[in-house]
Amino acid sequence: MIDRFGIGWRPALAAGILACADRIDVVEAMAEDFVDRAALATLRALTRTLPVTVHALSLGLASTIPVDEERLAAVARAVAAAGAPAWSEHLAFVRAGGIEIGHLCAPPRCAATLDGLMRNLRRARAVVGAAPWLENVATLIEPPGSDRDETAWARDVAAATGHPLLVDLHNLHANSVNFAFDPAAWIDALPAAAISGVHLAGGAWLEERWLDDHRHDVPDPVFALLERLAAHASRPLTVIIERDGAFPPMGALLAQLDRARAAVARGRRQRVLAGV
Amino acid sequence: MSSPAFEAFLALIYTDAAARVRFVADPRGEAQRAGLTPAQIESLVAIDGRGLELAARSLAAKRRDG
C-alpha cells in the first residue's frame, strides 16, 4: 500500500516546495487559483515536477441550489490541465439568494441537502469527468435545519454518494472539540474503502471555540487521529498539509510531513497486526 | 428541511450584521417574514446563538483577508 504525503500549493510556498520536491510526493492545487490561460499553463508545468491533485472550494455542492455551471467548467479545465486522476470539493454551501458567503459553510444536515448534493454530484461528474472526493468541513455553529449529528451525516453521505472521501482531520478535531462528540467514532463510522484523502492543518481558539485557521502547526490530537484513520482505511491515502498564512520555514512543514508519515506508518502496522 | 430560501436566509444572517441584529432580536418574526416553513422557523428559533456570533465574525475575517 503506497500512501502519499504532500503540501497544499500556495504562491508563498512554491519556491520551498520546488526546492524540496524530493521530500514531497504530491501537491494539491486550488482549482480557483488556476483559471486563466497563463495559470493553467503554470499548472501543466508543475505536473512535470510533482504529481498534482486538484481541490475546489467554490462549488457549494452540499446545497439545495444547483451548482454554478461556469464555476464547474473552470474546475474541469483545472483538473484537465493537472492531468489529475482525482479532484475534491467540500460538503459545504457557499452562496444562496445572491449572497456570496465568502467561505465554506456547513449545510443543514438533512435529506433535502443530501438530495441537492446528489443532483450536484451528477452534474459535477458529467462536466469534470470524474467523481470528486468529498471533504468534511469545520463549523463554529451547529448548522440550523439539521436533523442528524455530524457522525450520522458523514456516514449517510458516504453511503448515498459512494464517492471517495477526503477526511479533513483538523476540521474533525475542531468540530469534536466545539460540539463534544467522539472523533474516533466518527472515523469508525466511515466505510474503510471510501477513505482516500486526508487534510491536516492547525487552528487556534476563537474565544471558547476552536477555529480551523490554517495558520498554525498541526496539533498533536490531529496526528493521533491520523494514526487512527490509517488503521481503519483500507485504500492508499493521499495526505496533504494545508497552510494558508503565518507561513513557517519549509523545514518546519517538512517536519510535520515526517510526523504524518510516522503516524500513518503506525496506523498501517495496526492493520497488519489485526490481520485486516 | 432545507431549501433555497432557507439557505438564503442563513447566508443573510451569516454575512449581514444589520440583518443578524434584527434576527437575534426577533428570530421567529424575521423567519416568518422571510416566508420560511414552520419547521425551518423552529430550527432558527432554536439556533446556536453563540455559534452564530462566532461564525459570523470568522466569516467576516475570511472575506476581509481573502
Image (spheres, coloured by chain):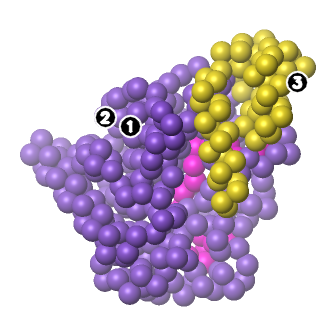
Chain colours: A purple, B yellow
Q: For residue B30: magenta?
A: no
Asked if residue B34 is positioned above or below residue A248 in the image, the reply reads: above
**Can you give x and y, in whole percent of width and height, for residue B13 in the image?**
76, 33
Amino acid identity at mark 1:
Leu
Give the magenta range: A77-96
Q: Nearer the viewer, residue A76 or A227?
A: A227
Nearer to us: label 2 or label 3: 3
Q: Give the labeled residue for mark 3.
A: B34
Residue under label 2 = A184
Give the spatial CA distance, label 2 vs label 1.
10 Å
Separation (CA) of disc 1 from disc 3: 37 Å
Q: Position of residue A208 (x, y in %)?
A: 48, 33
Look at the numbered discs 2 and 3 and tell me whether their residues touch, using CB distance below 8 Å. Answer: no
Any magenta on residue A87? yes
Residue A125 at x, y percent in the picture? 63, 55
Chain of the residue on which disc 1 is drawn = A
Q: Sort mark 2 into few (<14), some (14-19) or many (20+) by Cα contacts within 10 Å.
A: some
